[in-house]
Image: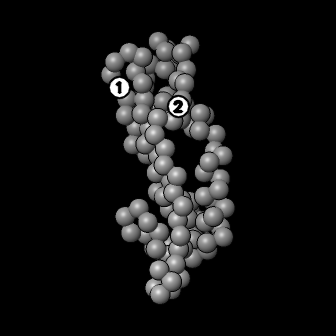
Amino acid sequence: MPVKLQTRFPMPIQVYVNGHKWLARKLKQHAIRYTKRENAFLWIEDLARAQKFSDRFCSLDWPSLLSRYAKKINPLTADLLKAMPYYWVTAQSEYSTDILFKKRGSL
């Protein structure tokens, strides 16, 4: 997850999250085999479980997760900026609907 810390005050942070990479890590953690090329899944051993993981992505507690990253990359959050927590917004978002074809002819 690339994170960009601006050097101007109040030191805004940009975070880039890729849902496909996140899902790939979840599948690997749960020993679910898959084939992925670039940012596309070509095959997933257990589609039902993969879908359950994907459904959870939107409901993660993003402000808490992102605030933990902010503390790691911006040392000023421990003292100078302690009373000024980050306010998180989505500047750009993309929603992906993946369709997996089982037969070449269907494609």
Position of residue 38 in the picture relative to residue 92 (left or right): left
Dot label at residue 89:
2
Image: 6 above or below 91: above
Taking depth in this image into account, of 50 and 31 the one nearest to the observer is 50
User: Which kind of residue does numbered mark 1 sit on?
Assistant: Gln
The residue positioned 52% from the left and 78% from the top of the image is 101
**Image quadrant where residue 88 sits:** top right
* 88 or 33: nearer the viewer: 88
Q: Amino acid at mark 2?
A: Val
Residue at x-position 60% and y-position 34%: 64
In the rendered image, residue 96, in percent from the top left (x then y), is placed at 51, 57
Crowding at dot 2, Cα within 10 Å, few <14 / some 14-19 / many 20+, comes out as few
Task: Look at the image and tell me in which quarter the N terminus lies.
Answer: top left
Label 1 Cα neighbours within 10 Å, binned few <14 / some 14-19 / many ≥20: few
Query: Which of these two is toward me, 48 or 85?
Result: 48
Residue 77 in the image: state x and y as whole percent.
Answer: 49, 20
Separation of disc 2 and disc 1 at Cα? 16 Å
Name which residue lies at 66% across and 61% down. 52
Whole-percent x and y of residue 65? 57, 38
Indicate whether 45 appears above or below 87.
below
Q: Of the numbered discs in the image, which one, if any, rests on residue 6? A: 1
User: Taking 61 as reference, is 21 left or right?
Assistant: left
Q: Position of residue 67 (x, y in %)?
A: 54, 31
